[in-house]
C-alpha cells in the first residue's frame, strides 16, 4: 500500500506487484490462464504448458503461431487506494507495453499504445472506481501492423522493412545470433498516478565543468503543472545544500538549477580511480504546501569525445575528467531473448564478469532495448561507461510525421531517464544504418528521387531530431551512426569508429588486424562453440550432431559452421576430426588467441582510442561471437581478456624482421623503468632455434612504451614461434607466453 498523504504532490499505486492477480487468454477463446506480469506472452504460455520452451531444441519453429494471435491481459476487481481518489488528476501509467495494444478500464476505451520504448499515460479521472475495477489490455500482432503500414508507404524502405516500421525491440524479428520470437506483453510496471496541481516526474544531475577544486553542475527537474504557482526547491547534494524558487508553468516543462560544488570527489571509470557516488535529495514544495521528495545517487565527472584532425586523420577517443582513457569492453545485447524484469543478481553477475576482466565500457547495441534503471545504476557503481545506441539497427527507417512523433517521445523520455547517470558516455543514432545505405547495395534499382527522399528521411531522424533532443536535455556527445564509414571505405581506418568485419564476413585471416587498426574499434568478432551445457540445450533428446535440426537452428549465421572450421583449422589442421568437445574447445582457443592478439595490437597503437569487441553475451543457446554464453559460462576468450585488458600490458610487435617489446600502462602517471627478459624460439619439427635476451630496460614516459628492436634474421623460414616474456617493474613481475603464427 502507498502511505503518502493527501498533501503530497502525487501518489502512486502499483498494479503489477506480486499481489495483483493478472490473467490472460487468446482473444476470442474462453480458457483463462494465470500469468506473470511484467513479462511476455511466450513465457506465460510456457508456464501454462501451452507451448514448449522456445529457446530449446527446435521449439522456435513450433511457436511462431504465438506472434500471429491477439492476446488479452486482464486485472479484475482491483481496489483504487483512497489517497489517489482524493487527487485532482488520476492517470493510468503504462511504463512498458510491447507493443500494439488497446487499453480498456471498466470497459471504457482509453486509447492505444504503439511504441515499446515509450511510457503512456491515460486520464482515468471519473472512470476509476474505489473498488471493483477491471483493466484489460488487448495485444495485436506486430507483423500484421507492419504489413499494413507498409501498404500505406509510398517509398521503398531498404533493409528489413517489417521490423523497421515497428517500434519494438528489433532483435525479436531474428538476428544472426538469435531466434525470431515476435512476442508481446506488459514489460514494465503499470501504475495509477494521482496528483494535484503538479506532478514531479524526474530529476537528474550533470557536470558541466571542473576547475580549481570546484565543479559547475546542473540539475534538471522535469514536472507537469496544472497552473502557475511558486515552487520552492531544496536540493541536498552530499551534504551541500542549495535552495531556489521558480514559478511553475502550465503543461510539461523542465526547471534547470545551476549550482557549484566545492572540493568534489570525482567519479572515475573502472581502474582509472574510484567511481564515487553522492547521495542526492531533491524536494519540491508548492505555495499551497504540497511536497514531493526524490532521492538518487549521482556522480561528478566530465566526459568528452575528442574528434579532431590529427596526424593520422581524425581522432576518436574519450576524456573523463580531462584525462584521456583508452576504452576496453564489448558490445552488449539484451540479457535474455524474451522481455521481462531481470533481478539485480542477474545483472550484477554479468557486470562483475566485465569488471573482473578490466572493462571500462559497454556498448548497448541499437537492435535491443534501452536498459532498466537498475542496469545503469550498477554500471555507475562499477565504473563501466556506456556507449548508448538509440534503438535503430541495420535498416532504413520511416520519416513520416506519426513515426517521428513517436520517436520524439521515445527519445525525450529515454534521454531524460538515462543521460544523468555518470556511466553515460555517448548517445549514438543507430547501428550500421549509414554504412548499409552507402555500401550494402540498397540503392540499386531505386530512382534518383527515391534515393533523395530516403536520404532526407535519414537526415531528419539521425542528423536533426535525435541530436537535437540529446543536446537539449544533456551535455553528452552524440554520434550519428556506428560506424561512420563501412570497411569498404578507405576512410574507415582513419576517421570515426570502425566495425571491421574483414575478419569473419570477408574471410580475412587474423593477421590482417596487425595492420587494420582504426581510430576506435567499436565492432569486430569471431564465433566459437559455447559450453557443453549449452550444447545440450540445443539438442536435448539426441547426441550432438552438427547436421541435426536442433543444432542447425541455433546457428543463425548461414556460413557460421564453415567459417569456424576454416579459421580453427588454420591453426589446428586436424581439429574437425576430433570429438565434439575437443573441437569445441579448439574453436574457443582460436577465438581467444586471435581476438586477444588483435586487442593487444589496438592497445599498442597511438592511433586507437578504444576497442569494443562483438559480442559480450548471448540471448539463447547459440553459436555466436560471444565471450560469455547464455548460461553465464565464460569462454576461453573472456578468461584471456583478463590479461589482454589488464591495466599493465606486456606484449609485442614484429616489423621488418625485428621484435619490439611493447609495454602499455593505462594507469601511467609518473616516469619509471620496466625491465624485460625473455626468449623467442622458432618451432620446427626436428629442432628449435631461439634467441634469448635479458635486462632490456624500457623507459616508461607515457601510456605506450616500446623497446629497441631485436633482430630476428637468424630465425628464417615460415614456422611458428614461441615468445616468452617477463617484465619486472616496481617489484611486480608479469610473465607471458605467445605463439606467433606464420
Image (tube, rainbow, N blue to C red):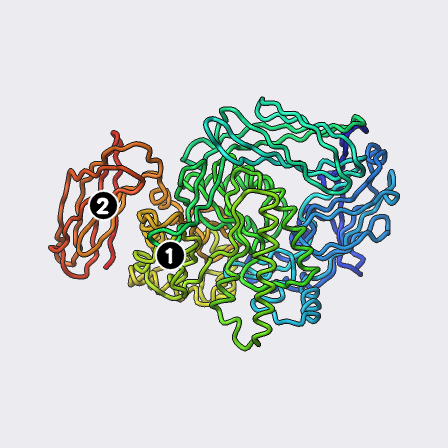
Query: Total marks drawn?
Result: 2
Q: Is residue 663 visible?
A: yes
User: How many C-alpha atoms fall within 10 Å of the one at disc 1: few (<14), some, or many (≥20)?
Assistant: many
Foreground mark, 2 or 1? 1
User: How many C-alpha atoms fall within 10 Å of the one at disc 2: few (<14), some, or many (≥20)?
Assistant: many
Q: Is residue 305 above or below residue 138?
A: above
Q: Position of residue 325 (x, y in %)?
A: 40, 41
Q: Is residue 49 visible?
A: no
Q: Position of residue 103 (x, y in %)?
A: 79, 52
Look at the numbered disc 1 and give the secondary structure of its residue: loop
Q: Are marks 2 and 1 in contact (CB under 8 Å)?
A: no
The residue shown at (76%, 49%) is 23
Figure quadrant of the C terminus: bottom left
Q: Quadrant of residue 95?
A: top right
Q: Position of residue 207 (x, y in %)?
A: 54, 35
Q: Position of residue 324 (x, y in %)?
A: 40, 40
On residue 494, the disc is: 1
In the picture as drawn, the residue positioned furthest to the left comes out as: 714
On residue 550, the disc is: none
Q: Distance of mark 2 from mark 1, alpha carbons?
A: 25 Å
Q: Is residue 69 left or right of residue 196?
A: left
Foreground pick, 348 / 420: 420
Figure quadrant of the N terminus: top right
Q: Is residue 697 left or right of residue 563?
A: left
Q: Is residue 491 left or right of residue 147?
A: left
Residue receiving disc 2: 661
Q: Is residue 111 above or below residue 675?
A: below
Q: Quadrant of residue 358?
A: top left
Task: Decide which of tag 2 and tag 1 comes sooner along the chain.
Answer: 1
Look at the numbered disc 2 and give the secondary structure of its residue: strand
Amino acid at each position: 500500500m502507498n502511505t503518502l498523504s493527501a498533501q503530497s504532490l502525487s501518489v502512486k499505486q502499483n498494479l503489477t506487484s506480486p499481489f495483483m492477480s493478472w490473467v490472460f487468454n487468446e482473444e476470442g477463446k474462453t480458457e483463462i490462464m494465470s500469468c506473470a506480469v511484467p513479462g511476455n506472452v511466450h513465457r506465460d504460455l510456457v508456464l501454462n504448458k501451452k507451448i514448449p520452451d522456445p529457446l530449446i531444441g527446435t521449439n522456435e519453429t513450433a511457436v511462431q503461431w504465438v506472434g500471429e494471435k491477439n492476446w488479452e491481459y486482464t486485472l479484475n476487481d482491483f481496489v483504487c487506494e483512497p489517497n489517489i481518489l482524493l487527487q485532482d488528476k488520476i492517470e493510468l501509467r503504462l511504463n512498458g507495453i510491447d507493443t500494439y495494444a488497446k487499453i480498456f478500464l471498466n470497459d471504457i476505451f482509453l486509447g492505444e499504445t504503439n511504441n515499446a520504448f515509450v511510457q503512456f499515460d491515460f486520464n482515468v479521472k471519473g472512470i476509476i472506481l474505489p473498488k471493483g475495477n477491471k483493466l484489460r489490455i488487448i495485444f495485436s500482432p506486430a507483423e500484421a501492423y507492419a504489413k499494413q503500414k507498409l501498404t500505406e508507404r509510398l517509398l521503398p524502405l531498404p533493409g528489413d522493412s517489417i521490423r523497421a516500421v515497428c517500434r519494438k525491440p528489433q532483435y525479436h524479428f531474428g538476428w544472426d545470433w538469435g531466434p525470431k520470437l515476435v512476442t508481446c506483453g506488459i514489460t514494465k510496471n503499470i501504475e495509477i498516478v494521482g496528483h494535484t496541481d503538479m506532478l514531479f516526474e524526474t530529476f537528474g544531475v550533470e557536470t558541466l565543468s571542473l576547475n580549481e577544486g570546484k565543479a559547475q553542475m546542473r540539475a534538471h527537474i522535469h514536472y507537469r503543472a496544472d497552473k502557475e504557482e511558486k515552487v520552492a526547491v531544496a536540493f541536498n547534494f552530499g551534504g551541500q545544500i542549495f535552495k531556489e524558487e521558480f514559478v511553475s508553468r502550465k503543461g510539461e516543462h523542465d526547471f534547470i538549477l545551476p549550482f557549484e560544488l566545492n572540493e568534489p570527489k570525482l567519479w572515475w571509470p573502472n581502474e582509472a580511480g574510484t567511481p564515487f557516488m553522492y547521495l542526492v535529495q531533491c524536494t519540491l514544495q508548492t505555495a499551497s504546501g504540497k511536497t514531493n521528495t526524490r532521492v538518487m545517487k549521482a556522480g561528478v565527472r566530465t566526459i568528452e569525445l575528442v574528434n579532431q584532425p590529427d596526424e593520422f586523420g581524425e581522432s576518436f577517443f574519450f576524456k573523463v575528467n580531462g584525462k584521456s582513457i583508452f576504452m576496453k569492453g564489448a558490445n552488449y545485447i539484451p540479457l535474455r531473448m524474451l522481455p521481462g524484469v531481470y533481478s539485480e543478481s542477474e545483472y550484477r553477475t554479468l557486470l562483475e564478469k566485465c569488471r573482473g576482466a578490466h572493462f571500462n565500457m559497454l556498448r548497448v547495441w541499437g537492435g535491443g532495448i534501452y536498459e532498466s534503471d537498475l542496469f545503469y545504476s550498477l554500471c555507475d557503481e562499477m565504473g563501466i561507461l556506456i556507449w548508448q545506441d538509440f534503438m535503430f539497427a541495420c535498416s532504413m527507417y520511416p520519416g513520416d510525421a506519426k513515426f517521428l512523433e513517436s520517436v520524439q517521445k521515445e527519445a525525450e523520455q529515454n534521454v531524460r531517464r538515462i543521460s544523468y547517470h555518470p556511466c553515460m558516455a555517448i548517445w549514438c543514432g543507430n547501428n550500421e544504418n549509414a554504412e548499409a545505405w552507402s555500401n550494402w547495395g540498397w540503392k540499386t534499382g531505386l530512382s534518383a528521387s527515391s534515393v533523395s527522399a530516403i536520404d532526407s528521411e535519414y537526415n531528419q531522424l539521425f542528423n536533426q531530431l535525435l541530436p537535437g533532443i540529446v543536446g537539449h536535455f544533456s551535455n553528452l556527445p552524440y554520434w550519428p551512426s556506428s560506424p561512420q564509414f563501412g570497411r569498404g571505405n578507405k576512410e574507415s581506418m582513419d576517421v570515426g569508429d570502425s566495425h571491421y568485419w574483414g575478419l569473419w564476413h570477408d574471410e580475412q585471416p587474423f593477421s590482417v588486424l596487425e595492420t587494420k587498426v582504426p581510430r576506435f574499434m567499436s565492432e569486430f568478432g569471431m564465433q566459437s562453440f559455447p559450453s557443453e551445457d549449452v550444447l545440450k540445450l540445443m539438442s536435448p533428446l539426441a547426441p550432438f550432431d552438427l547436421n541435426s535440426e536442433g543444432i542447425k537452428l541455433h546457428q543463425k549465421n548461414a556460413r557460421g559452421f564453415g567459417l569456424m572450421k576454416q579459421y580453427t583449422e588454420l591453426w589446428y589442421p586436424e581439429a574437425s576430426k576430433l570429438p565434439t568437445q575437443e573441437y569445441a574447445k579448439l574453436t574457443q582457443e582460436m577465438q581467444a588467441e586471435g581476438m586477444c592478439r588483435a586487442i593487444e595490437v589496438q592497445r599498442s597503437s597511438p592511433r586507437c582510442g578504444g576497442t569494443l569487441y562483438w559480442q559480450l553475451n548471448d540471448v539463447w543457446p547459440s553459436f555466436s561471437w560471444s565471450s560469455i554464453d547464455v548460461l553465464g559460462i565464460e569462454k576461453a576468450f573472456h578468461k584471456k581478456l583478463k590479461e589482454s585488458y589488464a591495466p599493465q600490458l606486456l606484449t609485442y610487435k614484429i616489423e621488418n624482421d625485428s621484435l619490439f617489446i611493447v609495454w602499455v600502462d593505462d594507469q601511467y602517471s609518473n616516469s619509471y623503468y620496466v625491465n624485460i627478459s625473455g626468449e623467442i624460439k622458432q618451432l620446427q619439427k626436428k629442432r628449435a632455434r631461439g634467441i634469448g635476451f635479458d635486462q632490456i630496460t624500457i623507459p616508461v614516459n607515457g601510456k605506450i612504451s616500446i623497446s629497441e628492436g631485436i633482430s630476428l634474421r637468424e630465425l628464417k623460414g615460415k614456422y611458428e614461434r614461441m615468445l616468452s616474456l617477463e617484465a619486472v617493474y616496481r617489484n611486480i613481475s608479469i610473465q607471458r607466453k605467445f605463439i606467433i603464427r606464420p
